[in-house]
Amino acid sequence: MSGVPQNPPRGCTRVSVVIPCYNGERYLADTIRSVMRQEVGPTEIIVVDDGSTDGSREVVAAFGAQVRYARQPHGGAARARNLGAALATGTLLAFIDADDLWTEHALGALIAPLERDPSLSMTVGLMEQFVSPDLPDGARHGFRFSPDPVPARMCGSVLVRRSEFERVGEFSPRLESGEFTDWILRSEAAGLRFATVPQLVLRRRLHLLNHGVVRKDARQDYLKVVKAALDRRRAATAQEGMA
C-alpha cells in the first residue's frame, strides 16, 4: 500500500491529518488505513501518542515513513491534538480519533467546497455510528443509538483552514472531555463560516473503551463547555448593548 495516496489535492492545498492516540493499539491501524485510502489524499498523517503503554508505537512503526509519529507524556486528547497541529505543515487541518474511520471519499468531499469558496473557514460532513464488530453479543446490545447519518461538527467530520484554526486558538487542555465541542463553540463565537456537505465522511466506532464509557464523570466537562459558551454569549450581548 502506498503511503500518501496517489491523488493529492489540487493546486497548492495541503492537508495534514492529526490522529491523537492513547492506548489505541486495537483500532489504530484501521483508522490509519482509512485515511490512506482516500481518493483525494492528505499531504501528511501525524499520529500523536499521548503516553500510550500498549503497542501503539509499533502499530505506527509498521507503516514506516508513510506516517509521522510524535510522543508526549500522557496529558489528554487536547494536548495531543495541539501538538499535532503545531507539527503540521498543511494549509488545511483534519483531526480523527484513533478508533474511528473515514469513508473512501471523505477528504475529497470536505476539500471541494473550501477550494471553490475562499471565504469558507471549514467544512462539516455527515457521521454515522456503528458498534465495533469485535465486541461480544452481550456488549453489542448495550449500545443505544440511531444508525442514520447526521451532520456532526465533531472530531473526524470537520476540515478547517489552518489560519482559521489558529485564529480560534488551540483546544483547551483544561478539558479531558468535550474539548472538540468547546473548540467548535469558540469557532462560532469567532464568526467562522462553515458549509455542510451532504456526504457521509465519518464512521464513529462504539466500543467498551470509548472515552464517554470509561470516564463516568465526562458529563462535568461538557457542562463546563456549555457554561463557557453561555458566558461568551452573554458577554457579547452586553458588549453590543453598550455599543
Image (cartoon, rainbow, N blue to C red):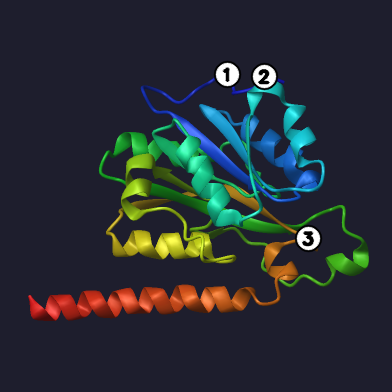
Task: Give the alpha-carbon distance from disc 2 to disc 3, as whole Å.
Answer: 29 Å
Numbered label tally? 3
Mark seen at residue 207: 3
Secondary structure at badge 2 equals loop
Q: Residue type at mark 3: give it.
A: His
Q: If you read the primary sequence from the N terminus, does the residue marked by circle 3 or circle 1 appear first?
A: 1
User: Which residue is the site of mark 1?
Assistant: 6
Q: Position of residue 34 (x, y in %)?
A: 67, 37
- How dense is the environment of label 2, judged by Cα within 10 Å: few (below 14), some, or many (20 and up)? few
Viewer-side label of 3, 1: 3
Secondary structure at badge 1 equals loop
Secondary structure at badge 3 equals loop
User: Which residue is the site of mark 2?
Assistant: 2
Quadrant in which the N terminus appears: top right
Q: Which corner quadrant of the image does residue 239 belong to?
A: bottom left
Seen in the image, is 201 located left or right of residue 56? Answer: left
Task: Give the alpha-carbon distance from disc 1 to disc 2, as whole Å.
Answer: 8 Å
- Are circles 2 and 3 on residues that touch, CB within 8 Å? no
- How dense is the environment of label 3, judged by Cα within 10 Å: few (below 14), some, or many (20 and up)? some
- Are circles 1 and 2 on residues that touch, CB within 8 Å? yes
Seen in the image, is 209 located left or right of residue 222? Answer: right
Q: Position of residue 31 (x, y in %)?
A: 69, 41
Quadrant in which the C terminus appears: bottom left
Q: Residue type at mark 2: give it.
A: Ser
- How dense is the environment of label 1, judged by Cα within 10 Å: few (below 14), some, or many (20 and up)? some
Q: Residue type at mark 1: give it.
A: Gln
Q: Which corner quadrant of the image does residue 211 belong to?
A: bottom right
The answer to whether residue 85 is seen in the rendering is yes
Q: If you read the primary sequence from the N terminus, does the residue marked by circle 2 or circle 3 appear first?
A: 2
Q: Residue furthest front?
A: 73
